[in-house]
Image (cartoon, rainbow, N blue to C red):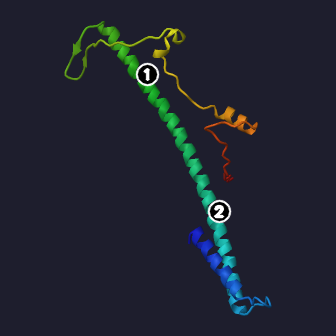
Amino acid sequence: MTIYEIDDRIRECEGALMDAVDEETGEITDEELAQRLNKELAALDVARERKIEGACLLRREALASAEAIAAEIQRLTRMKKHEENRANGLKRYVTNALCGEKFKTPMASVYYQRSESVDVLNVDMLPPAYVKIKKEPDKAEIKRAIKGGHEVYGASLVEHMNTIIK
């Protein structure tokens, strides 16, 4: 049973238990049914608790796996960077060895191609038409302003309910 199915069954049992009570006197009309429902409710409570605990433990396991994956990503990133640096070093080695001379064999070839790039010496000296400006909200300052009683058009403070599982 899922947690949702357990919760539904708990509600059904509680409803049946309420039906087994006389509304006027408050006495239980079917003692055997009430005992059976109470036993089932107790078992459902245990099952619900186990399901929730299991979900929490699975979450802990998923976080541990994510942490291990992050460590592996860092290790692979370092390896990638090392191999890229090695490849660039070999390219410089070949470039220095050939001194601009073309090279061709059945397994490898080296040639040169002209390209252009812009080297910006001082971005502050560039005319505004040649500068991109990234517009980004300062959320911390917006939050301080709203909490300080100021109205900030285009923004609002939203409260969230965060679940903490340990």
Answer left or right for 58 relative to 98. right
- Residue holding disc 1: 85
**Percent x, y of residue 158:** 66, 46
Helix, strand or loop for disc 2: helix
- In the rendered structure, which amino acid carries the disc numbered 1? Asn
Rendering quarter of residue 38 = bottom right
Q: Residues within 10 Å of mark 1 (few under 14, many from 20)?
A: few
Mark 1 or 2, nearer chain start: 2
Q: Mark 2 points at which residue?
A: 53
Residue at 59% x, 49% y is 63
Position of residue 20 in the picture relative to residue 100 (left or right)? right
Where's residue 157, x and y in %? 67, 43
Residue 107 at x, y percent in the picture = 22, 23
Q: In this view, does 29 lie to the left or right of 54?
A: right
Alpha carbon distance from label 1 to label 2:
48 Å
Q: Which residue lies furthest to the top in this view?
A: 99
Q: Mark 1: which secondary structure?
A: helix
Q: Which of 130 and 120 is in front in this view?
A: 130
Is residue 138 depicted above or below 57 in this figure? Answer: above
Percent x, y for residue 116? Answer: 35, 12
Query: In this rendering, which labeled residue sits more in front, label 1 or label 2?
Result: 2
Camera-side residue: 7 or 22? Answer: 22
Mark 2 belongs to which amino acid?
Glu
Name the residue at 60% across, 68% down: 3
From the image, which quarter does the N terminus lie in? bottom right
